[in-house]
Image (cartoon, helix red, strand yellow):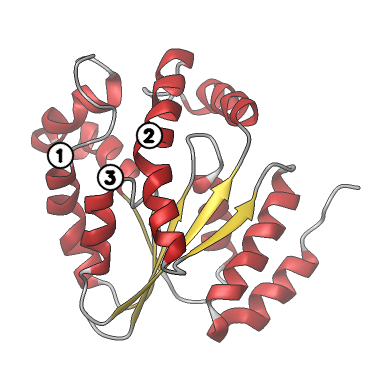
Amino acid sequence: MLKTTIVCVVGPPGCGKNFQLTKLKVAGLFPAKYLSSGDTFRDAQKSNPRLWEKVRPYLTGENKQKSRLVPDEILREVMTPQIKRATGLVFLNGIPRTSSQLEWILSFQGARVRILFLQAEYERCLARIANRRDQEGRLDDNAADARERMVEFQLLTVPVLRAAHQCELVRVIDVNGGPEESHTNFLRGLAEILPDHRQILLEHADKSPVSP
């Protein structure tokens, strides 16, 4: 893989990763590949029964002894081919979540890696998850599972982000506001790490309506 920029978009459950990346993709400001391990695993319920059997306990909470995160080896097996096929700009939704995932992302030869951390308050994230559950019916969007995933994020992912921040890989984005305000912040933060697309991102951010 050569001349590739990997932008990892991470944050606690309910911070709005899907929302931000979907709006960016729909806007079509520049060519990019959008990859989500979560979407891949959830879609497997209908499209890939063999993969679904592997990941189902982690997505549904059937096995309470297991982490809510799909094991890294399964994630790498599924996502590595997709990343290797991509060139140019690649967005990874929700990765990395563990130290080994960060090492894996950094191992792609010729790739420039940056991380956007979407920062949102705990109660705001839970409220968004409840709303998403009503609208989308995701298997892992019940209140108990959401709290477990929040705890796991604090224990496993926050230390990874701190380490990456020390290496100047991380930019923090405040997404505590409403949808449009949060997206404007997201676009402006993205402009800081993508100099080739800085102008169009800032122009689009300035056009986004923000409630007073």
Residue lying furthest right:
212
Which residue is rendered at x = 56% and y = 49% of the image? 118
Q: Amino acid at mark 1?
A: Asn
Task: Name the amino acid, label 3.
Answer: Thr
Camera-nearest label, 3 or 2 = 2
The residue at the point 42 percent across, 71 percent down is 32
Secondary structure at badge 2 equals helix
Q: Is residue 205 above or below residue 160?
A: below
Q: Residues within 10 Å of mark 3 (few under 14, many from 20)?
A: some
Residue placed most toward the observer, 173 or 5: 173
- Residue 81 % position (x, y): 16, 63
In percent of the image, x 34 and y 38: which residue is there? 156
Residue at image mark 2: 155
Q: Which residue is mark 3?
A: 40
Q: Secondary structure at mark 3?
A: helix
What's the distance in space between the residues labelled 1 and 2, CA to CA? 31 Å
Q: Which residue is mark 1?
A: 48
Q: CA distance from mark 3 to mark 2?
A: 24 Å
Question: What separation in Å lies between label 1 and label 3 (alpha carbons)?
Answer: 9 Å
Circle 1/circle 2 CB separation < 8 Å: no
Front in this rendered view, residue 164 or 6? 164
Q: Position of residue 68 (x, y in %)?
A: 29, 27
Nearest the viewer among 94 and 205 is 94
